[in-house]
Each structure stands twice: as C-alpha cells, then as structure tokens.
C-alpha cells in the first residue's frame, strides 16, 4: 500500500519470446528483449524502469524462459532493481498461463492486487501519456474491468490485431467497453477498419486485478487454470528464482490471454492512447522509430550509404557495412550471419529462422558470443576436431566441476588470474601462462581476482558439442539441465 492508502500496482513483465522476425540479431539464446535496440538500456530494462518511479509500484515480477534467467537477473542488477520474483517457465505455453502464474503468486500476497502486465519487447516514447493511461486503467481494473491499451493506428498495419470500441465507460470518453477483438487483418480489411474510425491496435499490455483474471480464466479455461495452479503449488526455489513445476505446467494447454479470456469476458475494456508505442516486431518497426539521415536511411554502427534511400542498415561492432544504389532494404550484419531483405518483406524473416532451425543450423539458436552465469564465451574459429574460444569469467565466479568425454582443452590466460583444479592438482595461472586439461579428467576454472579473467581456450577431440559435459558440482544449480 502507498502512503495515500491506494492499492499498489504490481508490474508483471513477460519475457518468454524468441523474436525470430528480428533474426539474425534476435535468436533463441539471446532474444530481442535482452538487447539494446532502441536506447542505452535493453528492452527488458526499459520495460521494468517504465513503472519503477511510481510511488504506488511494487517490485516487478518477471516471467521468463529458464534459459535466460541469469541474463535477466544480471540486467535487473545493472539497473538496481530487485524483483519480487523471477518466475521460470519450464515450457512455452503462451501468455494466458504465464499471466495466471503471476496472478496466483501475487494474489497469494494481495488478492485484490492490480497487475500491469507488460511484454518485455515494447518501446514507448511518451512516458507521460503512458503514465496517464496507466492511472485510468488502474481505476477501471479496481472496479473489476480487464483493461488493455489501444494504440492509435498510424496506418493500415497488417501485423497487429485490432480492437473495436463499444460504449464509453467514462464521462470524458477516455475509456470504452470492448465491442470486438479483430485478428490481424489483410490490407483491405485494415484500411476498412481505419476508415471506420472506431478501432485501435491491440497493444498486448493489460491492467487487471489478479483475482478477477483468475475468476475469468476459471470460467472460460478451467483447464489452463488447473494446470497452472498445480505448477505454482509444486514450484520450487532455485537460488533467487521460482521454478514452476515442469510436469504440471507442461500438462496445461497453450493459449494467449486474448483468446482464453479477453475475447470471452464481458468486462473487457480498452483505454485508447497515443504514447509513441512500437512492439519492435520487425526490422521495419525499428526503422520507423530510428533516427534517419536526409535520404530516410537508419544507419546503426559503421555504415556507408551511397545512392541509398529508405533503408535500415546495421553493422556489427568492428565491421563496416557499405550500401550502394539500394532503396527500401534491410541489411543487418552480425558476427556470423548477414540478413539482406526488402523492407516490405520483413514480416517473413521468421520463415528464414525457421528454415535454419529445421536444417539444424546453430545460427538460428545462438550467437558466437554465448552468455553464461559466470560470464561468456565467444567462438573465434572452428574446424574438424578443433574449436577456439575467447572466455571471460567475472570476478569471484567459477565454472562447474566437470569433465568431457570427447575433448581435451588447452587454456591460455590473457589477463587476470585463474585458479584451476585439474584432477587432484590446484594451481594459479597468471597472464601469459597456460595449462592442459586432458580428456575425461575432472576440472574447474575459477576467477579468484577482482578483475575479469580472460583466456583463450583451444578444444580438440572427436566431438566438440556443448552437451559433452558432465557436471559434478555447480554454483548455479545446473547439474540436472
């Protein structure tokens, strides 16, 4: 409760998507919400900070993929936010179960709590308008409405769902009952919706009381509620995380809050708003909100554009992208993949990512730099029976006590100090010193110092996959993964 006695607002941040339409930058192992795409903070950090200064805001609850838990915890630490919970989804089940898990946890502490449910991959440029819309939505939610924000359309967009307004719920006409939810239309239908003048885009942001959401979910999708209730009841602590029960959660159906509840309830409300909103769903969405040159090009990084117009050009750090004689294209360069696409086809980039995944290509899943709770590793080179990596271990951090059945490793310390256990021997290595880890020998790497430990690892053997690892002890509870 706030000093004024008003009910607290509980931010719920959903961070479960992979953002494959923003491939090759967004990938399963490091999706778009964890990256700095539109400002100094990541999209996740921007979402959390959006309500952090409100006097009535409780600490946020984040629902996320278990694979990203350590990255998310670190990003929250970077912005000095201590979450109420980081809840780990053991399987992807869409937004209705994720929000149900949050509602059950929050309702256990405050049954009439008002939740502000926010996807972690949105950009909002007008925080003043966002705050005013949130104030109104909060009042409606206290009265039992299930509220969503409706964004004023800027054109006949076919990538968004639409909401048709019903009767006004406030005297000033700032909030309305929902007459109808409309799925993503084709171009002609989108133009007709805009011409009607009573439709907004469906933002995917919801403000609702925890108990009311659970009541409505129980009315329309009791199967989802039962599965999530069991998953929460049998959840377990894992360091600073709350891990939902995997068997119970996976047994429940997958569905969105739109289908499961909002399209069925008679208490759905919409607050139309203009807040410079974008869901950053495609490269064209990023192009629209980016700063542009006098030829309407958005150039990010080291980019040279000649006789090029209306394009989004993004260079990877340390690389040059040069474009000549191109109009309305998207060029996105990363360390191991380059996307070149017509700007009006970026809705279909997901098909490229799906094809790469079907072909077993690692570029669909992860970048060359892979983040771990102890730091990161980055592949420098690889070939038959060898792989070279750059590793960074944070001060005070350690890798698990482990062994490999199919590879040996050579480590060369570039900077910092390494404490290395290999078999029964423990030794310290300093800059320019090296060691050898034989195949099949238990070993552990630690950074006992106060600066980052950086080293080069050379792997050699018959199989070099990341799944060739047996963990015996681990500070991060990953032995069973």
Image (tube, grey):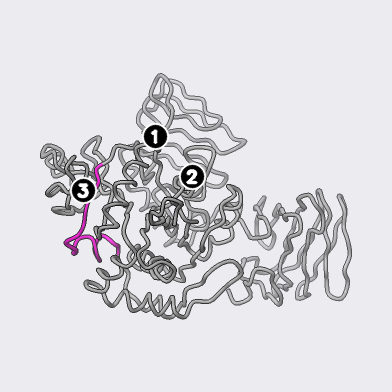
Residue 188 relative to residue 246: left or right: left
Which residue has dot 2 on it? 53
Which residue has dot 1 on it? 287
* Cα gap from disc 2 to disc 1, whole angstroms: 29 Å
Where residue 277 appears, x then y in whole percent? 35, 40
Q: Mark 2 or 1, which is nearer the eye?
A: 2
Label 2 sits on a secondary structure element that is loop
- The answer to whether the residue labelled 3 contacts the one labelled 2, judged by CB atoms less than 8 Å apart, is no
Mark before the other along the chain sequence, 2 or 1: 2
Can you say which quadrant of the picture contains the C terminus?
A: bottom right
Q: Which residues are magenta?
A: 256-272
The numbered dot on residue 467 is none
Residue at the image position 28 percent from the left and 66 percent from the top: 212
* Cα gap from disc 3 to disc 2, whole angstroms: 31 Å
Q: Residues within 10 Å of mark 1 (few under 14, many from 20)?
A: many
Residue at the image position 27 percent from the left and 71 percent from the top: 215
Can you say which quadrant of the picture contains the N terminus?
A: bottom left
Label 1 sits on a secondary structure element that is helix
- The answer to whether the residue labelled 2 contacts the one labelled 1, judged by CB atoms less than 8 Å apart, is no
Residue at the front extreme, as displayed: 4
Residue 174 relative to residue 118: left or right: left
Q: Is residue 83 above or below residue 280?
A: below
Which residue has dot 3 on it? 162
Mark before the other along the chain sequence, 3 or 1: 3
* Residue nearest the observer in this picture, 446 or 369: 446
């Amino acid at each position: 409760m706030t000093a004024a006695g008003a009910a607290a607002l509980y931010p719920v941040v959903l961070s479960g998507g992979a953002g494959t339409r923003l491939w090759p930058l967004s990938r399963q192992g490091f999706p778009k919400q964890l990256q700095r795409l539109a400002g100094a903070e990541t999209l996740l950090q921007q979402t959390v900070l959006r309500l952090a200064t409100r006097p009535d805001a409780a600490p946020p609850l984040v629902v996320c993929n278990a694979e990203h838990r350590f990255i998310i915890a670190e990003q929250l630490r970077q912005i000095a936010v201590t979450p109420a919970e980081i809840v780990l989804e053991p399987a992807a089940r869409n937004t209705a179960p994720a929000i149900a898990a949050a509602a059950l946890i929050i309702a256990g502490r405050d049954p009439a709590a008002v939740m502000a449910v926010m996807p972690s991959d949105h950009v909002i440029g007008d925080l003043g308008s966002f705050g005013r819309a949130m104030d109104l939505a909060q009042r409606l939610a206290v009265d039992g409405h299930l509220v969503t924000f409706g964004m004023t359309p800027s054109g006949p967009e076919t990538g968004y769902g639409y909401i048709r307004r019903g009767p006004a719920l406030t005297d000033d006409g700032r909030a309305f009952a929902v007459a109808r939810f409309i799925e993503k239309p084709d171009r002609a239908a989108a133009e007709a919706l805009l011409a009607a003048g009573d439709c907004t885009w469906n933002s995917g942001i919801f403000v609702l009381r925890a108990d009311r959401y659970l009541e409505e979910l129980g009315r329309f999708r009791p199967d989802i509620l039962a599965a999530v209730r069991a998953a929460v009841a049998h959840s377990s602590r894992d360091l600073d995380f709350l891990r939902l029960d995997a068997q119970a959660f996976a047994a429940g159906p997958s569905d969105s809050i739109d289908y499961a509840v909002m399209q069925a309830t008679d208490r759905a409300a919409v607050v139309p708003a203009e807040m410079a909103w974008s869901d950053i769903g495609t490269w064209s969405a990023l192009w629209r909100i980016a700063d542009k040159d006098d030829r309407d090009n958005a150039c990010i990084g080291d980019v040279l554009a000649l006789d090029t117009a209306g394009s989004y050009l993004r260079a990877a750090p340390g690389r040059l992208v040069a474009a000549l004689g191109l109009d309305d294209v998207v060029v996105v360069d990363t360390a191991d993949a380059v996307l070149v696409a017509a700007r009006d086809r970026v809705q279909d980039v997901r098909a490229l990512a799906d094809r790469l995944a079907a072909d077993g290509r690692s570029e669909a899943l992860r970048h060359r730099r892979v983040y771990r709770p102890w730091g990161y590793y980055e592949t420098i080179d690889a070939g038959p029976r060898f792989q070279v990596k750059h590793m960074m271990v944070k001060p005070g951090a350690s890798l698990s006590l482990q062994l490999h059945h199919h590879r040996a490793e050579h480590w060369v310390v570039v900077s910092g100090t390494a404490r290395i256990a290999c078999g029964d021997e423990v030794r310290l290595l300093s800059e320019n010193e090296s060691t050898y880890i034989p195949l099949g020998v238990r070993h552990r790497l630690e950074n006992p110092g106060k600066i980052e430990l950086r080293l080069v690892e050379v792997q050699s053997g018959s199989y070099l996959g990341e799944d060739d690892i047996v963990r015996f002890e681990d500070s991060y509870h990953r032995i069973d993964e």
